[in-house]
Amino acid sequence: MPTSLVILAAGQGTRMQSDLPKVLHKIAGAPLLHHAMQAGAVLEPECTVIVAGYGADQVEAAAHEIDPEALVVVQQERLGTGHAVAQARDALQGFSGDVIVLYGDTPFVRPETLQAMSEARATFDIVILGFEPADPARYGRLVMDGDLLDRIVEFKDATPAERAIPLCNSGVVCADADTLFALIESVGNDNASGEYYLTDIVEIARARNMTATAVTCDAAETLGVNSRADLAAAEAAFQARARALALDEGVTLIAPETVHFSLDTVIGRDATIEPFVVFGPEVTIETGAVIRAFSHLEGCHVSAGAIVGPYARLRPGAELAEDVHIGNFVEIKNARIAEGAKVNHLSYIGDATIGAGTNIGAGTITCNYDGVFKHHTEIGARAFIGSNTMLVAPVTVGDEALTASGSVITGDVPAGALAVARGRQSNKPGLARKLMDRLRALKDSKREGTS
């Protein structure tokens, strides 16, 4: 059965105290909206419709980062979840299949749970996702009759007996598209909030002799984000899950509680991650690599056997081949470092290509920016770049070439050549003592003048 997604993302989130649309606040380096879209992607949706409201242009831009074909519709008035889903009707005109309704501020529904809902739809007309929280609080309750879901009662409208029911409504719904929109047409707003509740479709469906059921999930999957405190709790929950998954997949985490992952972090088995490592978006670490303590990585690829850090920073476009060494206080940006090359100390390598087996001495800088344009540095294989070399791009250093320590390289260096670009040293015998004696005398005279 083909499936489409409708993701409700219209809220401003006033409790967030922010000008940013609520679904664009980030967990693990990615907007809440991306988490929901990624979970739904397991169903290979034919169409994804985002129902936006506040900051719709920003929401649309974020959605297209994940799915350029996603459709964004705008809910001009906030009249409830039923009204919000109804805004997707025109976007899904002609679609024949199931629709799953998700929420952009509920980021942790697992793909496996959505798959289970999709499978249950083969038997029931409507499938609702339910959960049993430790504190049911003000959630809507699922009134079951065996395997059949009889109705959903919002907390405000529930009787004391209904409020005692432990099974709660997450709001996630799966139904045939035609059925879903036909039922929504009959939803009214005669309730305590005066809103059109999506949940009312269950009772309407049962009155029409349709069937409904509930698939249950762990309460952690339904964690919603409505405040900064919720956002912090969601971040902690994501990181705990990501660390546990990494350990299960054969990654060594020396101090798991200190490592921070992004939504899309990929780490191969037998990699070792030392304490206080932060992974920004778009990082891939291959098997057997070692990321040492206090390193920060984003937008980079680290190949098997490479060692990074401690205190290293890999920025977007950093590509490390097998057995590369990147040492302490080294920054790599938009650079390809070939197999076995070493950049071990206090260096910046940006907009560069470093050949296999090359050694970059301490304090080396590729001077890549002239204030307007970025320029490229090319260093060949098995070259040796002396400590404190400034490579003023664009510049090329050939295979097996050397640069003398302290050189400022402004021209190409042929393969096998030694480049020396520094002033000749001149020693002045005895001048150091004379200079220091003069300075000390000057200092003493100033003290006497102020006493």
Image (cartoon, helix red, strand yellow):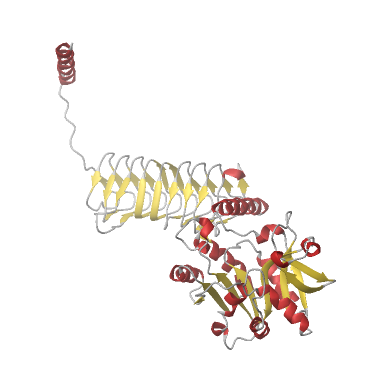
Image coordinates for residue 345, horizontal then vertical, percent: 40, 40
Closer to the camera in the image, 149 or 388? 149
Does 159 sit above or below residue 422?
A: below
Q: Quadrant of residue 123?
A: bottom right
Image coordinates for residue 170, horizontal then vertical, percent: 68, 65
**Is residue 410 found left or right of 34 in the rendered image?**
left
Q: Quadrant of residue 36?
A: bottom right
Q: Residue at x 56, y 76 (%)?
A: 48
**Is residue 301 found left or right of 409 in the rendered image?**
right
Q: Residue at x 38, y 45 (%)?
A: 359
Q: Residue at x 39, y 53 (%)?
A: 333
What is the total number of numbered labels drawn onto the structure image?
Answer: 0
Closer to the camera in the image, 434 or 336? 434
Closer to the camera in the image, 242 or 448? 448
Q: Is residue 45 visible?
A: no
Q: Quadrant of residue 39?
A: bottom right
Q: Residue at x 70, y 57 (%)?
A: 137
**Is residue 422 found left or right of 217 in the rendered image?**
left
Image coordinates for residue 296, horizontal then vertical, percent: 47, 48
Image coordinates for residue 136, horizontal then vertical, percent: 73, 58
Classify the position of the C terminus by image quarter.
top left
Q: Is residue 376 visible?
A: yes
